[in-house]
Amino acid sequence: MEQRYATSDEGRDVLASLDALRALIRDTAALSDTDLVDAVGTVEALGRMVDAARVRVAGEVDVRSARDSEDRLSARYGCRNGVELLERTTRVSAKTINARVRLDKRTRPRVSLTGDELPARFPHVGQALRDGTLGADAAHEVTTVLSKVEDRADPVEFDAAEATTVAYATGALEEQAGMIPPTCGEVEVHARTWAAYLDQDGPAPDAERAARNRGLTLGTSRDGVVPLRGSLLPEVAAGLQRLLDAHLNPAVRFTPTDPEDRDETEAWSPDEAVYDPRTNTQKRHDVLAVIIHTAAKATTTPTLGGAAPTLVVTVAEEDLHDPTAAARIDDTPVPASTAHRIACTGAVQKIIHDRTGRIIRLGTPERVFNTHQRRAITARDGGCVIPGCTIPAAWCEIHHVDEHANGGPTHTDNGVLLCWWHHHNLDRSGWDIRMRAGTPVIKAPPWIDRRGTYRPAPNALTRRKPTPRARSS
């Protein structure tokens, strides 16, 4: 096929053009100023035709690869879709190919449901693109800007806007007025001016369109984190924002005080400001984590296969007590220490296997602390016991002060409320918790309290605001 095309008249013209281009590239330095400027225009005109052909053939490959049949063009070449076929054929990026396909869809004639041919969405752009008078960059800008107001514009005015913008971009208006041709940036400004005229009231809220665009997607684990992306409806985003704001109150700030001014018997105040090293984005993540955990353990949460939503943690027997080893939550590797810690939350089932994969121990998915114990600990602590933390009791997890894996008892005298972040980062945070006569006492990190003293943790009583006394008459 290539040989037949090369021997045709069209093929010989193309090869002659290629030879001329090679000579131009080789001898550019020898051109005079006038010839150089002329060459720039000539080469660019040729480039516009090449770009138009790129757009057209990319769109055609995409159409033939989207057919609902086994004879898809991409499948015949072992590719998933037209974009992959074009990537491998052209060796350009998928972003560039998608842009070409998108421009072709906007400028090619359409077919109705009855089989009748309909004009392209942007017929003037398409014609100028095929004639080589409009470049791909300008065509992208014009179609992208005007497509945003296409649904809300008067059809006659929209056609006039497209035609005028194309005439401006190709220099037709400037030739009539004796002006210099516009730049691509000036073409974009011209198109945006038309868009503002066509849509003077701005985009009206479209509840149905917004509902169609809503969504939430969990990506694939990468570098220890799972990307989250999506679009929330305004009321959902506002509700989430209120929850985040409630527990990221900027009123709690770090104001250093001299810890030696405080007695060891004086309890940490819930309002006592303590330095928090987390960024705002990390804090929002951690608040979302406790919201998810709270919903998972709620009695009204729907079940999965007749059971509450439960994390399944698998770990090899020889790695059970190795803090540097890895366990797995679903198919995601996590440190074995993390697996031990989240077992306190109650929404986790631990599975231990040997090297052959045989299950040798199966833990219970029930919470380590039962309902009555949790209720009692909640009544005592009233929320996360780390000073300065605002996470309420209902959103907290119960932490074994003496680790359960090391034989720590599952008793109210050995359990305290911690939020998700303080629970999962207790070992690295510098805070330390002990139990004294059935109540928790807390030692702050050395950069907060250099004495290293244990003071009573905030509790339900100290969290209460004093009731104002009635004035005596």
Image: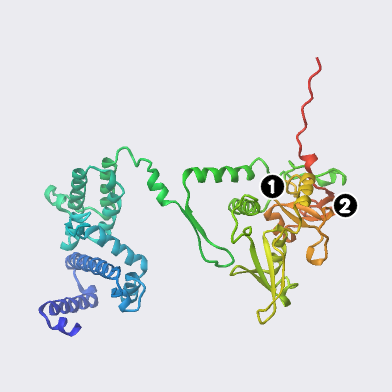
Residue visible at 15% across and 83% down in the picture? 4
Work out which residue is located at the far top of the displayed protein and give it: 473
Vertical position of residue 314 compared to residue 249: above or below = below
Residue visible at 87% across and 47% down in the picture? 264
Image quadrant where residue 249 sits: top right
Q: For mark 1, what is the residue?
A: 394
Helix, strand or loop under label 1: helix
Neighbor class of circle 1 (other Cα within 10 Å; few <14, some 14-19, many 20+) is some
Helix, strand or loop under label 2: strand
Quadrant in which the C terminus is drawn: top right
Work out which residue is located at the far right of the displayed protein and give it: 437
User: Is 468 on the left-hand or right-hand side of 66?
Assistant: right
Residue 95: x percent and y percent?
36, 65
Q: Identify residue type, mark 2.
A: Arg
User: Is 303 on the left-hand or right-hand side of 196?
Assistant: right
Neighbor class of circle 2 (other Cα within 10 Å; few <14, some 14-19, many 20+) is few
Vertical position of residue 304 compared to residue 325: above or below = above
Quadrant in which the N terminus is drawn: bottom left
Residue 157: x percent and y percent?
20, 43
User: Spatial distance from mark 1 to mark 2, Cα to Cα?
Assistant: 24 Å
Q: For mark 2, what is the residue?
A: 436
**Any mark on residue 405, and which?**
none
